[in-house]
Image (cartoon, helix red, strand yellow):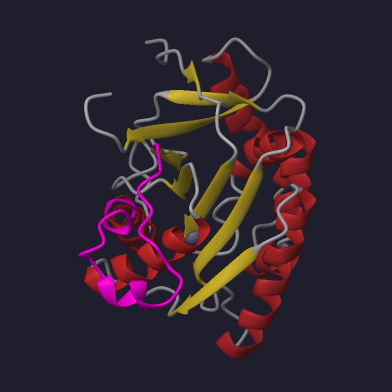
């Protein structure tokens, strides 16, 4: 069976906030799309819920945190993203719930984005490849927190200072979802996406995958996704509209 065609994502927006569980989550596909958007003059901000400090088996979390944050800042810079925020929640044991929604709602209220981007939070990546617990918790909380951010009576203790409610997020996009409906042509920015993944050198090294080539790996997905849009390379997103009746 032919995979379903993907509709092009809207590019009629100016600011996006990306909220993901770990450093490297955006670099496994979304970064090439982000490079395209920053190249169009859009502003994109990254927010990492954890610092991925439990991600390198041979490295203590204290050391790993420092290295992974630095790698993430560099990989963001490569795709035109200047601002990277780390929320400092504990890697590997992020819990979906009200406290997580609160911290993410606060980030949404501060940044006031048009679009919020997160990673796939379905149970699998398609087929039988199970998703990871932090990804599922964060993605679900992002959807809720975007709504919370617009309601002044939810987490109202955040609104004592200069912060206002923000109900201006039009859509939430989940990158790499098996239920993706939309895509972005990344043919011209694919190389920047590869460089952005390569910036996670200590992490990739720590995985110990012999002869693993980031370019080859990303190309396989980008080419298959591109075929669903009639372009050479693309990246896919599941779209969640945040308004009513549209
Ligand atoms: Zn991750």
Given residues 88 and 214, the one toward you in this image is 88
Q: Is residue 3 above or below residue 154?
A: above
Q: Is residue 162 left or right of residue 132?
A: right
Q: Is residue 107 left or right of residue 186?
A: left
**What residue is shown at x 39% (from left), y 24% (from top)?**
181
* Quadrant of the rendered image containing residue 34: top right
* Quadrant of the rendered image containing residue 235: top right
Q: Which quadrant is the N terminus positioned in? A: top left
Q: Position of residue 187 (x, y in %)?
A: 72, 24
Q: How many numbered circles are shown?
A: 0
Residues drawn in magenta: 146-170
Q: Is residue 121 left or right of residue 202?
A: left
**What residue is shown at x 77% (from left), y 56% (from top)?**
77
Any magenta on residue 233? Answer: no
* Quadrant of the rendered image containing residue 70: bottom right
Any magenta on residue 154? Answer: yes
**What residue is shown at x 26% (from left), y 70% (from top)?**
155
Q: Position of residue 207 (x, y in %)?
A: 61, 65
Q: Which quadrant is the C terminus positioned in? A: top left
Res. 207 visible in picture: no
Instruction: State the predominant SS element of the stretch in magenta.
Output: loop
Res. 13 visible in picture: yes
Given residues 166 and 235, the one toward you in this image is 166
Q: Is residue 207 left or right of residue 135?
A: right
Q: Position of residue 221 (x, y in %)?
A: 58, 32
């Amino acid at each position: 069976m032919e995979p379903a065609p993907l509709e092009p994502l809207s590019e009629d927006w100016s600011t996006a906030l990306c909220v993901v569980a770990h450093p490297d989550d955006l670099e496994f596909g979304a970064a090439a799309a982000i490079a395209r958007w920053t190249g169009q003059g859009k502003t994109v901000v990254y927010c990492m819920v954890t610092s991925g400090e439990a991600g390198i088996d041979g490295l203590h979390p204290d050391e790993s945190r420092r290295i992974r944050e630095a790698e993430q800042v560099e990989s963001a810079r490569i795709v035109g993203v200047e601002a990277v925020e780390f929320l400092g929640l504990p890697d590997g044991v992020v819990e979906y719930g009200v406290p997580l929604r609160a911290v993410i709602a606060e980030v949404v209220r501060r940044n006031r984005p048009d679009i919020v981007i997160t990673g796939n939070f379905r149970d699998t990546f398609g087929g039988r490849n199970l998703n990871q617990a932090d990804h599922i918790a964060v993605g679900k909380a992002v959807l809720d927190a975007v709504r919370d951010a617009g309601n002044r009576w939810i987490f109202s203790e955040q609104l004592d200072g200069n912060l206002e409610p923000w109900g201006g997020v039009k859509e939430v996009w989940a990158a790499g979802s098996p239920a993706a409906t939309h895509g972005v042509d990344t043919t011209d920015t694919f190389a920047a996406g590869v460089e952005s993944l390569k910036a996670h050198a200590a992490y990739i090294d720590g995985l110990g995958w012999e002869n693993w080539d980031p370019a080859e790996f990303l190309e396989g997905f980008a080419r298959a996704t591109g075929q669903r849009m009639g372009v050479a390379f693309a990246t896919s997103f599941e779209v969640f509209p945040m308004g009513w009746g549209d």
